[in-house]
Amino acid sequence: MKRSVMGMLALSAMTVAMGSAFAQQGAAGPAMTAAEKEQAKKIYFERCAGCHGVLRKGATGKNLEPHWTKKDKDGNTTEGGTLQLGQNRLEKIIGFGTDGGMVNFDDILTKEEINLMGRYIQNTPDIPPEYSLKETMDSWKVIVPVKDRPTKQMNKFNLKNMFSVTLRDTGEVALIDGDTKEIRSIVKTGYAVHISRLSKSGRYVYVIGRDGRLSLIDLWMEKPAVVAEVKIGFDARSVDTSKFKGYDDKYAIAGSYWPPQFVIMDGDTLKPRKVVSTRGMTVDGEYHPEPRVASIVSSEIKPEWVVNIKETGQILLVDYSDIENLKTTTIASAKFLHDGGWDYSKRYFLVAANASHKVAAVDTKEGKLAALIDVAKIPHPGRGANFVHPKFGPVWATGHLGADVVTLIATPSDDPKFAQFQKYKWQNVQEIKHVPGNLFVKTHPVSKHLWADAPQNPDKDLAESVAVWDMADLSKPKAILNVAKDSGMPPTKAVKRAVHPEYSADGKEVWISLWGGKTDQSAIVVYDDATLKVKKVITDPKMITPTGKFNIYNTQHDIY
Ligand code: DHE
């Protein structure tokens, strides 16, 4: 993480202000050279901060502050009744993972790096600098001004069926033609782009890197390229635009993990307008210094964004009709909020509160919590999947990182044809047997199938496979497709995790990424959704660590 002079000043001011508490904690961590500390800091940011937090207070992952990780000088393993870990135990956990959901890093980090990280997390966490509106503004670049951009589509691509694909470890996004399966453009973006989201118009793709770099790609250019860029923070995951009638793409919003805040920008240039902090009280009434911005979506019912704050469990409805006098509705739900998606009517947003094993449903029309539904351990929906269940009517599905099921939640409807199903609304109506380690589920309105991956499962075969159910009869045995084998790619030491099913615009194909080693050539395997047979394997020397894929039409219209 690069520190500006302003940032260093802010950091030292903050350290002084916070008094001796932090200084004491760090007093006796295992020794590290300055070079080792820098290396560990980089690895921590790239691999650990997402789950454990920059301040290591824990979220999806456990608290990693020294009072928990470090044995005292006599080698005692308890402090105030809390189990402390120490170097050997930490190395085992980092290397082999745990049943609690921590993944194994022995195929990603070397033995020396695992040893380094064990020592690093017994030392006091560094508090990274803050990041102001001025710094955001200083990072802002318009590469192609609006007046110099095309006034009509200059290429012959079928943009509806284009896919924006994250090449995680190369810091790029590949734009792949869904009709021909050719890579049309590879654009340099932030590190490990997390998601791609579409402008309401379908012309622009907004991609947000983990390093906080937001890039705006213009699909109308002869060769689609980045036309504007801004760094919205040091660590980020979410982005969207204003989608209510009359505000079409007027603004963009991006959420940051560090510092915990969100930034409102002009939609077509990314010019920063406002930075809003999310620090505050949790739903339990405790102050939290690092409440990170998880998923963000844009309502089409009101001029509002739904901004989900992970550590506080608060869901913010941010009204952008007057950004100078910003009005926000704060809805208490549960911790820790993560990812989520719309129900089929696009009135309710369902978001995973993963550490509470709940799903929160927000009614964006009434501006309040509609339900808090108990589900199995660690729900992880991505955006979820909507379909009409033969017995329960409209349902929204989520998979689980920590349980061997896919959960179906019945969602309400004003449509008279679904009146008979209203008695089930907000009930967890069915759990379909899957395996733990699932990240994403997906279906499409014209499909009869529900797809689910399991890339975080410790078993190699399961991590490399996906499961497919017939939605008309979920009691039928699921099909298991081993995507790594189906790809015909040569074997590699690293697991090739099959991740993120995504439909083509017509709903007839399903694309699955093979997330392989950080320098290995990998592939996207395209299946025929009707026959479940491989149609095409998209591979290229530049196809390295493909993860999320976003079909332009489906993403633009929230089809899942
Ligand atoms: Fe994600 C969505 C956070 C790890 C691939 N991920 C999201 C969202 C959040 C999030 C908040 C919702 C964004 C939105 O909708 O606005 N992800 C995090 C983490 O904090 C975490 C656990 C750790 C980290 O360090 O980032 C994490 N995520 C991963 C991965 O390791 C994945 C599998 C591979 C990768 O590319 O890094 C990954 N996350 C994704 C994808 C989505 C996503 C593909 C979008 C799903 C969709 O269909 O919308």
Image (cartoon, rainbow, N blue to C red):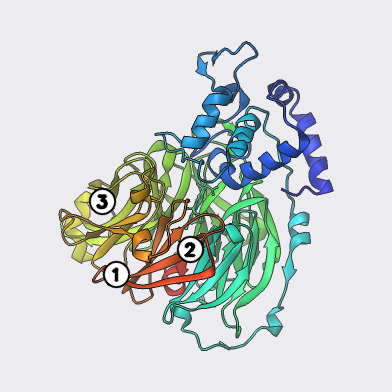
Residue 282 point in image, percent of width and height:
53, 36
Residue 267 point in image, percent of width and height:
62, 69
- Tell me the mark number nearer the camera, choosing from 3 and 2: 2
324 or 35, nearer to the observer: 35
Cβ atoms under marks 3 and 2 closer than 8 Å = no
Tell me which numbered mark, 1 or 2, is placed earlier along the sequence: 1
Within the image, what quadrant is residue 85 found in? top right
Kind of residue indicated by mark 2: Ser
Kind of residue indicated by mark 3: Lys
| Residue at 67% from the left image edge and 39% from the top image edge | 40
Q: Which residue is mark 3?
A: 425
Kind of residue indicated by mark 1: Pro
490 or 18, nearer to the observer: 490
Tell me which numbered mark, 3 or 2, is placed earlier along the sequence: 3
3D distance between C-alphas at marks 3 and 2? 42 Å
Q: Relative to 339, is 124 on the left or the right?
A: right
Tell me which numbered mark, 1 or 3, is placed earlier along the sequence: 3
Q: How many marks?
A: 3
Cβ atoms under marks 1 and 2 closer than 8 Å = no
Q: Tell me the SS state at disc 3.
A: loop
Dot 3 surroundings within 10 Å: few (below 14), some, or many (20 or more)? some
Within the image, what quadrant is residue 365 found in? bottom left
Residue 196 point in image, percent of width and height:
53, 64
Q: Tell me the SS state at disc 2.
A: strand
Mark number, residue 522: 2
Mark number, residue 445: 1
3D distance between C-alphas at marks 1 and 2? 30 Å
119 or 323, nearer to the observer: 119
Dot 1 surroundings within 10 Å: few (below 14), some, or many (20 or more)? some
| Residue at 31% from the left image edge and 55% from the top image edge | 396
